[in-house]
Amino acid sequence: MLSLSLGPIALPVGPVLLLVASVLASMVAEWVARNRAKHAAVDGADGVRNDAEPAPADAPAPRRIAAGDAITASVLLGLLAARLGHLALNWHAYADSPASVIDIRDGGWNLPIGVVAGLAWLLRLGWRTPTQRPALAAGAVVGLVIWGMGLLMQQRAAPAGYPEVTLVSLKDGQPATLAQAARGRPVVVNLWASWCGPCRVEMPDLADAQRRHPDIGFLFVNQGESAEKVQAFLARSGLALDEVWLDQGSRLGRAIRSPGLPTTVFLDAQGRQVDAHFGVLSAASLQTRVEALRQVSKR
């Protein structure tokens, strides 16, 4: 599942999942911290001796941050590191369009770098403030488990091969399955509609990529519109697209569990999903994903 439909609004699943996991992790960390503080206060009132060595009188007190806020800060730091890591590893793709580095809608993140950076920050904070270690650890575990399970469920929900849908060629009106349209090639399948503003924004970059990567198939699958409407839109926009297909029943969007547009799916030559993105793709992000698809297809 790539997107969630809430009435007329479609939301990407990935950011929603991360938001839910981080909020629950922050709540758990705060709950653990408050319970430990409450027990410490009760023990102090009962005269329980504290054997911990007191800090020197002139030692500066460590700067404290609430456990829940620390979890939130670690997520934000992880996101920043994940974005910077992606940009550093794919700087050549962004060289021609430097402004796109701030367009985080393109889904350009390096998750391992982000996770390591966020956990490293929490470890450093826990080392400086030992009393917060249990709360930070509990929040981090809960957040990672919820987020990881969500990612795993999202991955398992992806079709194992080509979705069983029949498309109609805009060029000659002939029907074909998605597997037949792919013709044994790795393909980039773009689901779009003429009324979709973000679709129109990214389409010139997709058309340019189609010309520059003849070894990769680019299938433009219109969702729910007639051939006349699609032809009129292409004539107005001046876009020269090859391999435009019609899916008037919008069955492909349902098959890949993404009701929102635009959705772009990257499939290898066997129809296995290598990558997928809901929302606008920048030219740089599209370039990195096409290169990754090509590398996977060579294995």
Image (cartoon, rainbow, N blue to C red):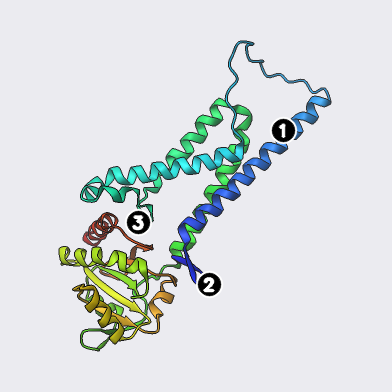
Q: Residues within 10 Å of mark 1 (few under 14, many from 20)?
A: some
Mark earlier in primary sequence (2, 1): 2
> Viewer-nearest of labels 3 and 2?
2
Residue 78: x percent and y percent?
44, 42
Q: Residues within 10 Å of mark 2 (few under 14, many from 20)?
A: few
Q: Is residue 144 left or right of residue 268?
A: right
Name the image quarter holding residue 247. Answer: bottom left
Hey, what amino acid is under mark 2? Answer: Gly
For label 2, the residue is 7
Q: Residues within 10 Å of mark 3 (few under 14, many from 20)?
A: some
Task: Examine the rendered structure and indicate whether residue 196 appears above or below residue 34.
Answer: below
Of the 4 image quadrants, the one containing the C terminus is bottom left
For label 3, the residue is 106
Q: Callout 3: helix, strand or loop?
A: helix
Q: Which mark is residue 37?
A: 1
Task: Examine the rendered structure and indicate whether residue 210 appears above or below residue 178.
Answer: above
Mark earlier in primary sequence (1, 3): 1
Residue 194: x percent and y percent?
33, 75
Mark earlier in primary sequence (3, 2): 2
> Viewer-nearest of labels 1 and 3?
3
Q: Is residue 49 left or right of residue 105?
A: right
> Viewer-nearest of labels 2 and 1?
2
Name the image quarter holding residue 229. Answer: bottom left
Residue 18: x percent and y percent?
50, 53
Q: Callout 2: helix, strand or loop?
A: loop
Residue 256: x percent and y percent?
41, 72
